[in-house]
Amino acid sequence: MTEHAPVILDVAGTSLSADDRRRLAHPLTGGVILFARNWENRAQLLGLTSAIKAVRDDLLICVDHEGGRVQRFRTDGFTHLPPMRALGELWMDDGKGAKAQPGSGALRATNAATAAGYVLGTELRACGVDFSFTPVLDLDWQDEATSRSGVIGDRAFHRDPRVVALLAKSLMHGLLQAGMANCGKHFPGHGFVKADSHTEVPVDTRSKKAILADDAAPYPWLSTTLTSVMPAHVIYPKVDSRPAGFSKRWLQDILRREMRFDGAIFSDDLSMEGARRLDGQLVSYTEGALAALEAGCDLVLLCNQSVGDGKAVDELLDGLAEARAQGRWQPSVDSESRRIALLPETIPQAWDDLMYQPAYLQALDLLP
């Protein structure tokens, strides 16, 4: 096990370049996040993931693969998974008239969520992908006059945090059956704000009490099930002046101590606008990574920066190495243990075998 490999980076294309291999071999690199540009077909994806593991077999291969509009691989047999809102709508559907059965929709929805997690996990693992950043635990505020989040929207299960928690737990059960860990996002909640943290710095002016009672409620309820969490690039000024992913108050005092979460904490993408400005100042990727690690993140993501010359990726790796040499950053054995714990412990099923496996075929039938 390396001392601490906190950086999750991307690769430029559908196969590895010499620069990709050099960056993946860097001792501070802990994983790779894949995007649609890294996809042609299943054979190519399996070749790419195999090549990544050949560089270092402990690298965590990740993807944003939730269902709905956030699904990187959609062709060559990959199931088109529903948006999570579809599961929330199924929860509310108890049928009509004399055939209505109170609570039947909730039971169908939890079964369907488990099926979605199983299909998601087994298909990705059959292609060599270890981990998906799912489920979204943000609340669906789309029908509220107070706010509407375009970036979350139908990615959320439901407006009620109790429904979100139970559907997310069901989906994570399916991931577990597939041998895949999970990631609840975006702590403590991104659904209430209108702004998109990819392009703006969202601000949620509610009190800590209001946020914990509503948007953040699923996190302590799922504390025994969540294996990782991703905080939001959102500022909650009544709690801290910094976005949650750079806040010791949110990550160490609230998430770790109050909610007793002991899994891995990922930063969201450091290249997003919501991560580029701290305390009103534009920061470098290295400064952003150091701030996230100091706040309590175990792992930091830098996405879409390997395209072209990849200078930003090299600057981050070199900058973190220099900060460590200068004593500005101390590697964490605990953080590294949390990263390693996200790697699958079972052998994945081959894609062709899935097509005849009863559990997989039944899961397909249960999807809404």
Image: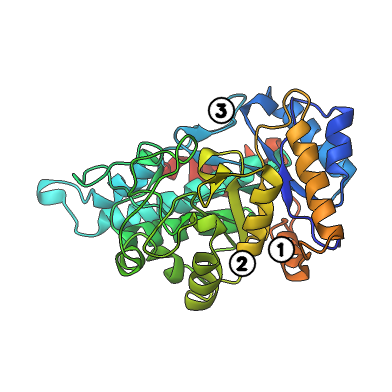
Display colour scheme: rainbow
Residue type at mark 2 is: Gly
Q: Is residue 64 above or below residue 16?
A: below
Q: Are marks 3 and 1 in contact (CB under 8 Å)?
A: no
Q: Nearer the viewer, mark 2 or mark 1?
A: 2
Residue 193 in view here:
yes
**N-terminal-most mark, 3 or 2:** 3
Q: Label 2's element?
A: loop
The numbered disc on residue 206 is none
Residue, x 45% and y 38% (percent of image)? 200
Q: Which badge, 3 or 1, comes first in the chain's sequence?
A: 3
Residue 176 spot, x, y in % from top left = 59, 58
Tell me which residue sits at (46%, 41%) in the image.
197
Q: Where does label 3 land, which residue?
A: 74
State which mark lies toward you, 3 or 1. Answer: 1
Do the CB atoms of the residues marked 2 and 1 lie less than 8 Å apart? yes
Q: Position of residue 366 (x, y in %)?
A: 42, 45
* Residue 362 drawn at (x, y percent): 50, 45
**N-terminal-most mark, 2 or 1:** 2
337 relative to 161 in the view: left or right: right
Residue for badge 1 = 341
Is residue 82 toward the left or the right of residue 62 in the image? left
From the image, tell me which residue sits under label 2: 263
| Residue 177 visible, this orientation | no
Alpha carbons under labels 3 and 1: distance apart: 28 Å
Give the crowd class for mark 3: few <14, some 14-19, many >=20 residues within 10 Å: some
